[in-house]
Amino acid sequence: MLETITGKYTIKQIFADNWEKFYQKNEALIRPAVKENVQRILACGDKDILGYHLYECQKCGKQHFVAHTCKSRFCNSCGKAMTDNWIKNAQKQLINVPYHHLVFSPPSELWLFFLGQPPGAKSAF
């Protein structure tokens, strides 16, 4: 049965609701890097875990807490910001002309040519 989720439901909320049970069932299969990134996502924006900056208005004295983020590429919030920054920086290196990205796979008979191997060499493919 497929469950339909409606409303504002984030990746972080899905992990918060399901990670422990999933981890207990699949602990042997989960790489340490995955576990670490999920823990970072769950702590993202939690000032008690990751800390915070405290800003205070010099005029009225009102204080504002800004929680630290996880900075994980896996996080849908932090990863999006990192991706946007990468794109912005990459675009600075491109010349101002229209681009088209093409991906193709040559026929197997041409693989040796594209791999720079001399004619007559045996292919590992």
Image: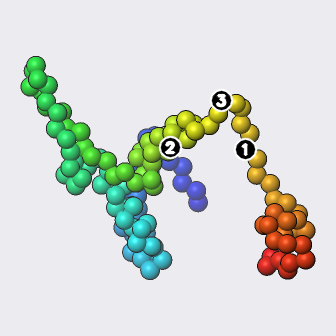
Question: What is the CA distance from the residue labelled 2 to the residue labelled 3?
Answer: 18 Å
Q: Secondary structure at mark 1?
A: loop
Give yes or no for contact between labels 1 and 3 (Cβ–Cβ under 8 Å). no
Q: Amino acid at mark 2?
A: Trp
- Work out which residue is located at the far top of the displayed protein and give it: 59
Left or right of 4? Residue 47 is left
Mark nearest the camera among 2 and 3 is: 3
User: Which image quarter holds the N terminus?
Assistant: bottom right
Query: Which disc is residue 50 wearing?
Result: none
Question: What is the CA distance from the residue labelled 1 to the residue labelled 3?
Answer: 15 Å
Question: What is the CA distance from the residue labelled 2 to the residue labelled 1?
Answer: 18 Å
- Which residue is the site of mark 2? 86
Depth order, front residue of 47/105: 105
Residue lying at 30% horizontally and 55% vertically, measured from the top left:
43
- Which residue is the site of mark 1? 101
Mark nearest the camera among 1 and 3 is: 3
Q: Which numbered disc, 2 or 1, marks the residue that appears first in the sequence? A: 2
**Number of marks in the rendered image:** 3
Depth order, front residue of 16/103: 103
Q: Residues within 10 Å of mark 1 (few under 14, many from 20)?
A: few
Q: Amino acid at mark 1?
A: His
- Which residue is the site of mark 3? 96
Q: Secondary structure at mark 3?
A: loop
Residue 30 in picture, x, y percent from top left: 45, 73
Q: Which numbered disc, 1 or 3, marks the residue that appears first in the sequence? A: 3
Residue 117 in picture, x, y percent from top left: 81, 71
Residue 114 in picture, x, y percent from top left: 81, 63
